[in-house]
Image (cartoon, rainbow, N blue to C red):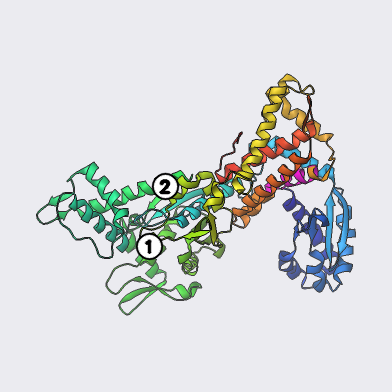
Amino acid sequence: MLINVLKDKFLNELKQFISNIKKDEENYDDIINKIFKSIRLEEPKNKEFGDLTTNAAMVLSSSLKKKPMDLANEINNEILLNWDIIENTAIVNPGFINFNLKDTFIIENLNNVFKEDKKYGENNNGNCRKIQIEYVSSNPTGNLHIGHGRWGVMGDILSCIYKKNGYDIQREYYVNDYGTQAKLFAECVKSLYLNKFQIKFAYPEDGYPQTTVNPVAEKLYKEYGDKFILNSDDALVDDEAIKKNAIDIMLSFIRDTLFSIGVEFDNWFLESSLYENNNFEKTIKFLKDNNLVYEKENALWFKSTKYGDDKDRVIIRSDGNPTYFASDIMYLMNKKERGFDTLIYILGADHHGYISRLKAIGKSIGMSDDCVIIIIGQLVRILEDKEVLKMSRRKGRGMTLDELVKNVGKDAVRYFFSMNSFDTHMDFDVSLARKKSSKNPVYYVQYAHARIGSIIRKIKETRPDNLNENEINEIESSNALFCENIIKNLKNLEFKNKSERNLAWVVSLFPDIIYDACKNNAPYFLTQYLYRLSGEFHYFYNHNIIISKNKINIKRLVLALAVKIVLRNALEILGISAPEKM
């Protein structure tokens, strides 16, 4: 990492600088622990201001009783001017310190791209800490809607990002196969299944769309025949067997849909398994023994407000049946028992109320607040030629996720879904996603990779005079002689113009992007970065000659190859192809 390493170095030296001023004052620790959280070292919004900027002087001025501009000069003189990697600094109102790094430092960072190759961008910050990420978790009562697809893609990419940061990740899908909705779905399937044998059984009035249910009933009929019919005269069937098999079939449809967008899970967890082996009774006993529940109005209540929730929650209704919240308790306890250090839930927009209740459960069983993370995913609008397509999963209307994938392809679906933060509504422009032009962001990024592929093909075809045969044949092998020669060439690399330097700079930021995307649970950091990198490369490609006559500009080739490695690694995290030709 470049920026994060420099930030850590800066903050450590800043602490020492402050200690020399405030070491005898009582509030020194407060300055370090509280105010330091607001200090930034980052890229300025306007690149003309420099490579990096810090607001440290403005943050610290009040506590140190100094004017921001005066303090900025002190920080600059005592810390930054002692760094041999800095080319120049500038102090601007109201107290920002801007600075540029030496070209040699940026060039040295390019070494890591070729040395680490496929591992470039990774770090061990997670130290194998066990994290479980649960996402999608749609009721197995219908096809997945577009929102499920977005949460599935973003959950999958976030899991990859955590892995790249050294965490031990498990992806989990929670199957709601227990409760009223599962029973209603089974009744719908039962009706259509019996109808295929000319046995009349009323379809539930509030049932699911028959267009959704019929494929399940059809598959039951074809695969099992009349196996589940116990008495045709009385329309008596094995209800549990129908329910189990109907849900299994629906889950197979869901798996196929998710697979079509590159989303797979390590574990599919059945809600019904929580109620096996007297686990519910054991859980209630645990809650009572630990004084976490009380009885009121013939119902059993969980003391949620004691742990930060806005109200207490019913676990067992007055009729003796468990609530959904009972399953929430048992499921979270089950996750903790499986040894996960942190639990991440990615839930739909209609689950905002789950934040306080899930955190309350975690606190009640000894998990700290930051060990239970709830991310709320917002919905998607589908646009076709600027017209909004109406969606309704329950009524069976609108474009399904399967149809969207067939319409624009997996790559476009994954890229577009990951372009915004989880908590932002998004418009998916189907017309734009189909375009084969630079207006389409996924095409724009993939085209950068393909352009570099075309450079390599041209080198192999023309056999430039200033590359030997082995170098040409091994041009993309990270373990070959050519890679060693690249690193040697980096020592002599000098930037001839801004486009070369800007490209090398953005390449060097990739490890920071992976780290920051994990720290902020923000897959969209990666798509934003890819678009920026691709833009820098396209400009570089259009304004610099790489191959001239029968000679190749090796230094520019080095930059192009570094970009290709980063594009490949980033697209792999996104689950998007990196084409050699387009």
Residue type at numbered disc 2: Thr
Q: How many residues crowd around disc 1 within 10 Å: few (fewer than 14), some, or many (20 or more)?
A: some
Q: x%, y% of residue 127?
A: 60, 48
**Where 375 sits versus 435, above or below?**
below
Quarter where residue 556 is shown = top right
Q: Report the disc number at residue 543.
A: none
**Stretch of the chain drawn in magenta:** 500-511
Q: Is residue 519 visible?
A: yes
Q: Amino acid under label 1?
A: Ser
Q: 256 or 281: nearer the eye?
A: 256
Q: Nearer the viewer, residue 335 or 198?
A: 198
Q: Are marks 1 and 2 in contact (CB under 8 Å)?
A: no
Left or right, residue 34 beside residue 203: right
Is-magenta flag for residue 405? no
Mark 1 lies on a secondary structure that is helix
Query: Pointer 2: what residue?
Result: 257
Give the class, few, some or many, for how many residues have Cα within 10 Å of label 2's Cα (few <14, many ≥20).
Answer: many
Residue at the spot 73% in from the left edge and 27% down from the top edge:
482
Vertical side of 522 occupied by 567: above or below = above
